[in-house]
Image (spheres, coloured by chain):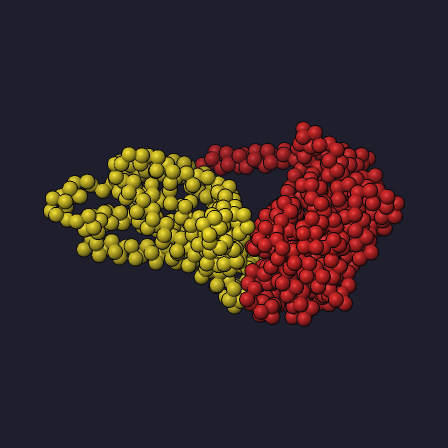
Amino acid sequence: MKKLLLAVVLAALALSVFASCGRGDDEVRIHLLGLTDDAIANYTELGTMGNPGQQFGLGVRNAILDIEGIGDVIFEDWGWAETLDSRQRAAIAAGDHPHIVGGEVFMPSYALDDLLLPLPQDIVDRVVETFLIRNPRNEPVAVAIGGTVFMLFYNYDLMAQAGFYAPPTTWDEWQMMSDAITAVGNGEFWGGGVPSFPHAGGALRATPFFRMQGVDFFQNGRLMLDDPRIHSTLQFIRDMNRNLPPGLGDAADEGPLWTAFNNQQIAFGVDGTWRASYLEREGVNWGVTTLPLPAGGVPGNCLVGVTFVGVPRGASDTELSFNIIRAALREDVSVRAIPQGRVSPLRSIHHNERARIAAEGAHMVVAYQIVYEGGFGGLVVFPRNSAEVWDIVNTMVIARTTQSPGTPIETITSEAIARINPLLN
Amino acid sequence: MRSKILSRDKREARIAYLILIPIFLYIAFWNLIPLILGVLLGFAEYNVLRPPEWVGLRNYRHFFASGVYMRLLWRQVWIGGIALGINTALSFAIAMALNNKARGRGFFRTSFYVPAVAAVSVTSAVFVALIDPFGGGLNRFLVSIGRDAIIWNHSQFWMVFWIVVYFVWRSMGPAIFIWLGGLQGIDPSLHEAAKVDGASAFKRLRFITLPGLRFVAAFIILTGIIGAMQMFDIIMFLTAGNPYGRTITLMYQIYRHGAVRFNLGMAGASGTILGIFTLLFAIIYFVYMQRREAKYDA
């Protein structure tokens, strides 16, 4: 029996030795999207080294490798969205804190949970406020290395078929034009409206329209779903939905809607700067402008396509971690974000690269203008159970508005409030 | 002499335990410990970023007080029940057909099994493409025969319909094979004797085939209950809860709590309650089968 016990102990020891061999303590592991060896090799194999996205990724990668004394760097692919979030949380829970953490819609939750270290002042000073996330003590703890905002893309040819030659500037005008294009299209093409996908893709696109009315889902410590401005915006989203191909505006999968837009079956699309490259590729006669405003409204928007980065408390070498962020924010690297259709967070680029921005096209001029002048952040964060509350807003409010057109808006919001309030208190 | 026999028994028992210990350890490590941790999580608030905080019965109170979770549990039961009922009946009917010595039955047996080995993520993508309201294969077909297109994702009825269709399409193969195994285990002389006695096909089914399959039926239904109560991947890939959350079941909610929202406390509590209900359903069915068996023996 003693021999057996000894064997068990030895086996456990051997296992722990093997486990510890898997990771060198002086290795730096970076899991930002698109920086892995495979990603770089794929681009090289495909002969797309000139791809703007690749140039930006390669720029960030090389800048990180240039950091003095960084040693061995391993670039890993941890995915995006929920996959990335779960892997980062697992690493933190295991005490194996990454040098930096990244992400988009869930990063404010990390800040709210006070997981991230405050950013050094030199980083904060270099970026536009819109690209910062703050913790409950109002300290900036995460910064975006790029992002964009929503704008109205339009198809000249479809507009012309209904006799329109300039994009709309107001909600009423947009609705009138969209209704007319849908009527002319007669089931072949549609005017277009505000997507209400039952996930963050819907919330991100709907949020600018609420903000144009001066309201958001959570304001001044209060859930705003009973606000008349929320109701009138939801009514507008519902009214505009009849100008989208049936069932596409609120489908779980965004893909078919954007395929229809690229295939010239929809005249107006609310999307980020990346849409321009798809429209170019498909040979669409397209244009872009700021989102139309409601009567008496104010410009409103929402940051999207953002890669926020921050340093988790517990990171082994915080100075190195911040140097990695500094490297990703180097001016010669960040400028490569412009042809990729991303807005650089650096103040200096907003000031010094206007010609380069203009050369990329109207969509980039519009995006930089909105970000710099508007100061719009990402989606709001609810003080408790934020992900669960957003889930209810996405499915039971935004998507239900169009999926259940017979249900009064007030019923939709009051039922959602009843479900959300217990989660917030 | 006696002590020698006993020591031999002990030696054999010791060897048996030595052989079993790795299996016990494996089960404890991969099943028992996670199970215990899952139950314990139900008494905590834990989002992975902060240490777990003990909250007692708060998650369980929220489960029963909110009303939402009981609705999701009920939805799991009725959607799962419909899917299981149709799957059990249809797979039995097909097994009966495939039990005949007809040409091409090998081809059909394989065809029915193929969906079970294909990845859910892939086959559900095909279904999603078919029921795409705009440009999907089914709506194209409906329009081509002069009917109106259906916005499937706006209707709870249609979304549940497709969940059931997909579940049955995918699960039927294994069930057919189990039924077939049972059918081939029935002594053919019983049927021949009944035929000689002038028993109709229905009577042979009622008094020979069905009683002969009672253990197979118990296995299919019992494992089916467990499978139906754990159904979430089909919903995740096919409907994602659409329309506006009306196809979300408790198991899908547990997945979203655990892997998407990181509300692990509610995931633990909901998982424990779902596990208890599944066990209850299984026990009820088991007791029912035992009583029937006793009645049959008598």
Looking at the image, residue A356 sits to the left or right of residue A238; the answer is right
A22 displayed left or right of A50: left
Q: Position of residue B12 (x, y in %)?
A: 35, 36
Q: Can residue B253 be seen in this view?
A: no
| Chain coloured red | A
Quadrant position of residue A224: bottom right
Most extreme residue toward the right is: A352
Chain B drawn colour: yellow
Residue A381 percent across, percent down from the top left: 69, 59
Residue at 29 percent across and 54 percent down: it is B289
Q: Which residue is drawn at 79% across and 45% down?
A: A361
Q: Where does residue A388 sit, x and y in percent of width and height?
A: 60, 59
Q: Which of B19 and B203 is in front in this view?
A: B203
- Please state which of residues A161 and A311 is positioned toward the viewer in this rendering: A161
Up the image or down, B145 lies above or below B62; here it is above
Which quadrant does the N terminus of chain A fall into? top left
